[in-house]
Amino acid sequence: MYRYPTRVAAPRLTPAETDQALQALSLAAQRLTAGQDSPYICDQLTEYVGVTRPRLESTCYVLMDWIKELLRGKRSLYEYNRTTSFDVRADVSLYEEMQEVRLAWIDWMIKELGNDIPESR
């Protein structure tokens, strides 16, 4: 259905910054799941998470830079997937399909960030 990006290292974050990044991604995923406001990850990060949680704002921009790197010059996750053999499912709308893809990317990003958490935490 869709592919995750080729390996692009997660941003180097301190443990506190990693916690903030995980929180920001979780909040963005909650908003996407609820269908609130924009269906785009970056919009959720900058227009909701960074605004309503000012202490997470700089972390949101770090995450956006990482997303831009992951997209490798594409303007959106849809465009990235369309050019990397993305097959649209016939049983759901494109909006629903892309929501699944965006949530899967957030889950993947959370796992990537979690891989950098030292065992002692």
Image (spheres, grey):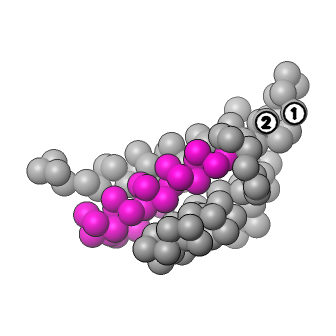
In the rendered image, residue 106, in percent from the top left (x then y), is placed at 55, 48
Residue flagged by tag 1: what amino acid is it? Ser
In the rendered image, residue 115, in percent from the top left (x then y), is placed at 31, 49
Instruction: Categorize mark 2 by other alpha carbons within 10 Å: few (<14), some (14-19), many (20+).
Output: few
> Magenta span covers which residues?
6-32
Q: Which residue is mark 2?
A: 96
Q: Say which mark, if any, is on residue 93.
A: 1
Q: Which residue does the image show at 29% across and 56% down from the upper left?
A: 116
Note whether 52 is above or below 101 in the view shown: below
Residue flagged by tag 2: what amino acid is it? Glu
Between the C-alphas of marks 1 and 2, the distance is 5 Å
Q: Which picture quadrant has residue 113?
A: bottom left
Viewer-nearest residue: 5 or 50: 50
Query: Does the stretch in magenta take in 11?
Result: yes
Most common SS among magenta residues: helix
Note whether 99 is above or below 37 in the view shown: above
Q: Which picture quadrant has residue 104?
A: top right
